[in-house]
Amino acid sequence: MQALFAAYHSSLVALFVLAALVILQSLIADVAGIRAKHVPGMPVTDGHKSFFFRAVRAHGNSYENLGLFLLLVLVCLFAGASVTWVRNWIWVFVAARAAHMACYYADLRTARSAAFTAGVVAELGLLGCAYMAL
């Protein structure tokens, strides 16, 4: 088992970076909520003009995309998919999520959509890697 994970070391580093990014998003959303004097548990209805709204949406979107991504990564790892391709697609996904977050914060809607699309392409790449390994 350890040999399996050793081959995918760079991929595991990318997953660590992704986890740190999601934690950072959580902290940013929390601080934005405190600054906006938001009452916890109440819906965020400010709209795209509010940084707090955008921070909460960026964080939520990351969580929505994590499940499928992690499932694909696990299938790739356990199926013995190409180390190089899996690593590359994981890093593309991590970069896309970072770009998506930054574009959401800056309210750059077209760039945000492009970053989201890059993440979906990375997931499709992982799907292909998993298919080829099975």
Image: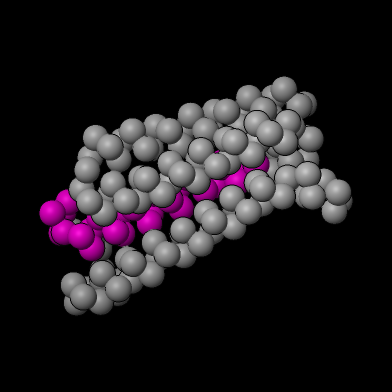
Q: Position of residue 89 (x, y in %)?
A: 57, 35
Which is more toward the observer, 91 or 81? 91
Q: Position of residue 57 (x, y in %)?
A: 31, 53
Quadrant hosting residue 91:
top right
* 25 displayed left or right of 110: right
Q: Residue at x 60, y 46 (%)?
A: 70
Residue 72 appears anywhere in the view: no
Q: Is residue 59 magenta?
A: yes
Given the current orientation, which residue lies at the most extreme left position? Answer: 49
Q: How is the image coloured?
A: one colour
Which is more toward the observer, 33 or 97? 97
Q: 25 above or below 84?
A: below
* 115 displayed left or right of 103: right
Q: Residue at x 26, y 69 (%)?
A: 32
Q: 131 above or below 101?
A: above
Quadrant hosting residue 59:
bottom left
Q: Residue at x 35, y 51 (%)?
A: 101
Q: Position of residue 75 (x, y in %)?
A: 71, 38
Q: Which residues are magenta?
A: 46-73
> Main SS of the magenta segment?
helix
